[in-house]
Image (cartoon, grey):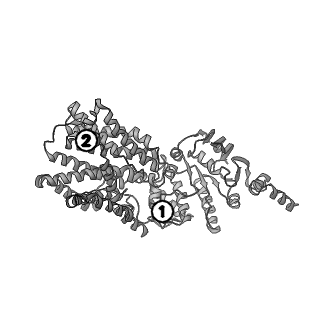
Amino acid sequence: MKIRLSLLPRVGLFSIALLILALVPAIASTYIVTFVLTLFMYIALAYSWNFISGYTGYISFGQIALFGIGSYSCAILIFKCNIPWFLAAAMSSLIAGALAIPLGLIMLRLKGPYFAVGMMGLFQFLAALAAIWKSLTNGATGIYLPPVSALSYIYFAFLGLAVALFLATWKLEHSVFGLRLKTVKEDEEGAESVGINTTFYKAFAFVVSALGCGFAGGIEVFYVSYVDPTTAFPAVLNITMIIMALLGGMGTYWGPLIGAVLLGQVSEFLWAHFPYFYLIIYGALLAFIIMFMPSGIMGYFHKRKMLKGGGDSPLPDGPMTLKPATGKE
Amino acid sequence: MNGTILSVENLTKKFGGLLAVHRCSFNVGRGSITGLIGPNGAGKTTMFNLICGNLKPTAGEVFFQGKRITGYPPHRLARLGIGRTFQLSRIFKGMTVWENLSLVPSPVDSSTSSVSKAEDLLHAVGLGHLPHTYAGTLSYGQQKLLEFARTFMLDPQLVLLDEIFAGLNPEEMERQIQTIRTFREQTQTTFVVIDHAVSAVLRLCERVIVMNQGEIIAQGPSQEIENNENVIEAYFGSSSLEFLMEEKG
């Protein structure tokens, strides 16, 4: 891959930002570290959701099912097989990804609201299964794990995951592969008619999303040192990750980051200052955003650019102007 | 004409109790322009969907370049060299004109680079000055032209055009006919065209297939079809046929 000069300032800024974030555990209070690592988890989950729902338009109301699969896989690997936690988290990411292949091929046959509700059903089904399958999951009693030795491990694990998913999204946004993935959202039948295997692209996005969710679940379970059906399949987090991506702008690469950071801050602030009215204000704020910025913050800017009549092609080999007509026809 | 490129044998499609296409058979010669006409609900678009894999036939077979392709998924047929456009154009409206073309997977044996191919195609259909315009902001006619150009990114052997003239004014229609003819001359592509503008279809096509209520009621050279009694009856009803016969004396 050739390095383009125009990218250098961005690479520089990115490195400085990473450096500052890497220093946080060394200098900040435990409260700040806990807060920031939770933000990283939100960012990772919002990007994971963005892969499948933002790019292919298959809105999933149950992507947290894969977070749950990751949580349980990691807990069982640590508890029963005595595998070191980070390796266990990485393996649970792969387990979630592998299970996503058959699950995706079944669920992605549903379209529009049917897929959304179908995924919600899958999430409920798995939560119920976790409660019943006592020999594997210990049912509602849950599995207890040894406590975390250092918070900074968790911090760096979530930071790494969030950065990896951000970079993957960035790469996707600047490739023909990503453009083809977006055709699924634009017009699936049209995409098929020009030779794009939409089933493959959808399944790919679903699997990448599962890898992210599964990894996050694995890290989270080690962080809280405990898993039961409600912590592995948290209904509130399921909605939060969707709303974060929606707020920032789904199908964009800055959207999930902006949405997660903004919403994470706002909910923390509201929770600290208005403990009784926190959820009421939060709900009203979300309703306001959906009503006035339905395509999110990044989507809002994108629309303005579209109406102005055109933009730069993000493709590396897209010419900015075409050579004059060759005269044939 | 040198051989058959597309061959449809006893193709049948049932939707519940409705026979949308019933035992239809026809051949399309390589390099020809064939018209497919018929009143509303005759089964023309269903026929396209069966050929292009969007629908699976109840019975019958489709052969492309001598190879059995019945039941292949649409994307595979596209890669084999069957391009199509839709009644309502299915371009990617949230992407630029340039992106619409450049995302098409290039054929395995393609000799030209997809960049220069896309440039040539955009100029050929008169969209060369709008590469970075979002497709959704183009006019209706321009969107149809973009879809037409996009199809040719596949280096197709056969292109099926569904209602290519719909919504065009006479001048645009004339230009569209010219564009199709130019493309045929330069790329030796075979065309099958559906449209309700019967006179334009008869003028553009060497052969015409007429469908009515799911069955092929006539096929042959355009001049023969023009005077075919069954065709006039299908379009205007039997009483008008008597009327026309009386008129002719």
Name the side, left or right, on which A167 lies relative to B125: left
Element at label 1: helix
Q: Mark 1 is on which residue type? A: Ala
Name the side, left or right, on which B177 lies relative to A99: right
Q: Nearer the viewer, residue A54 or A61?
A: A61
Q: Alpha carbon of mark 1 to alpha carbon of mark 2: how far? A: 43 Å
The residue that appears at 23% across and 41% down in the rendered structure is A221
Q: Mark 2 is on which residue type? A: Gly
Q: Position of residue A30 (x, y in %)?
A: 13, 52
Q: Chain of mark 1?
A: B
Q: Nearer the viewer, residue B42 or B111?
A: B42
Q: Position of residue B51 (x, y in %)?
A: 60, 45
Q: Which residue is mark 1?
A: B135
* Number of residues whose C-alpha sits closer than 10 Å to that of mark 2, classed few (under 14), some (14–19) or many (20 or more): many
Of the two numbered discs 1 and 2 in the rendering, the one whose residue sits closer to the viewer: 2
* Number of residues whose C-alpha sits closer than 10 Å to that of mark 1, classed few (under 14), some (14–19) or many (20 or more): many
The answer to whether any part of residue B105 appears in the image is: no
Q: Chain of mark 2?
A: A
Q: Nearer the viewer, residue B190 or B211?
A: B211
The answer to whether any part of residue B158 appears in the image is: yes
Q: Which residue is mark 2?
A: A218
The residue that appears at 15% across and 47% down in the rendered structure is A151
